[in-house]
Image (cartoon, rainbow, N blue to C red):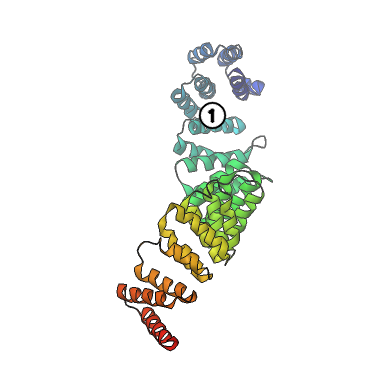
Amino acid sequence: MRSKILILVGLLMSPMNGFAQELSQYTAVRVQKAHQLAQDDKLQQAIEQLSSINVSKAYDQAFVSRMLGVFLWQDGKTKQAIQHLEKAVTSGQLQDEQAWTTRKMLADIYLSDQQFQHSLPHYYQLTKQVPKTQKPDELWLRIAQAHYQIEQWGKVIPAIDTYDRYHRKDEIQPLSLKLGAQLQLKQWKAAIPTLERLIALEPQKANWWRQLVSLKLRVGQNKQALDTLALAKLQGVPLSEQDQRLLAQLYAQRGIPERAALELSGLENAQKDVELLVAQASYWQMAREWNKAIDYWQLAANYNDKYQWNVAQLLVQEGQYQEALTVLNRVKGRKSEVALAKTRAYYKLNQLEQALIQAKIAENAQPSNQAKGWIKYLSQLRKSMS
């Protein structure tokens, strides 16, 4: 606290010699005493000393108000501090850098007190003529912060762009403000390079990568979204299960289903979670890895009988007819479809009578051209064989 007070008092008092030439002797003596009290950590007494000064000269009034405003702010009396600093600023008595620093103190206090709307006119006024000893970039950053807080998104971005012109390297805070405004304004494409700049600064922050992937998907850059998420994983960025599921989906969409299946296999519950088992089975099936697909459909069927049908279909497809019949007996519902699958299996096993029986069951359950075709074909085959 003490060091902060002394810095501000130093701004107020220096160059004291120049100010002393403008202050009346009466005021200068009392201001110097208040200054000394503040240096001695006697802030309350310094405030009382300044408050007791009875001055008529306009410049003296402005100077005392300026100094009193800072002391009151340090004492936690923000409302009173603002009143005194406003008085000093609007007096028109303070000139050049003295006037500039006073207005900046006022703007900064408004900002810290979350009176963002009040801070903005002062900040914009300050940008019109910035002393060489001051930093214009800080003004534009605070302007952006104030606009952001009152959700004036369209004014945040130009303020940050102006701030950027004073800097050769990127920084987290201004880029975060710009990103937030771009997202609020739904400027998806413009937000992508902003996120890429943030990732360059914080490459291990998963949320930046996650948002970048989301934006690329939103604008239809699915290939780039996959590359981004894959790069994040390659660089050791901690990905959530949801991120890894998305990565698998993107691999599948790209036509690399085996990579999608392998991505899911690394998840903690990959061998226990039914949804994950089904996804892996589907990806292996898309990859035409039939045996692996069968294995995963069987694992899924252990948790939910409805997947017995998927197992049976692949077993029939792969010519494992006896195993298929065993599984088909466990399938619930799908009477016509199951009967047709059994028809084919029995036919391949050269059990024509059983095949014909199943074809008739299928026709009775749900008449179809396929069932009729089997019945006709098997009947003729049986007749020719007899």
Out of 44 and 216, give the one closest to the viewer: 216
Out of 108 and 91, give the one closest to the viewer: 108
Residue 40 in the image: above or below residue 247: above
- Local SS, label 1: loop
**Residue on which disc 1 sits:** 93
- Residue furthest to the bottom: 384
- Residue furthest to the right: 168
Q: Which residue type carries mark 1?
A: Gln
On the question of residue 186 being in view, the answer is no
- Say few, some or many: other residues with alpha carbon within 10 Å of mark 1 (under 14 / 14 to 19 / 20 or more): some
Residue 206 in the image: above or below residue 315: above
Q: Give coordinates of residue 153: x percent, y percent.
A: 48, 48
- Looking at the rendered image, the quarter that the C terminus falls into is bottom left
Q: Give coordinates of residue 342: x percent, y percent.
A: 42, 71
On the question of residue 357 being in view, the answer is yes
Out of 155 and 282, give the one closest to the viewer: 282
The image quadrant that residue 335 belongs to is bottom left
Tell me: 127 left or right of 329.
right
- Looking at the rendered image, the quarter that the N terminus falls into is top right
Residue at 38%, 71% in the rendered image: 339
Q: Give coordinates of residue 94: x percent, y percent.
A: 56, 29
Out of 87 and 279, give the one closest to the viewer: 279
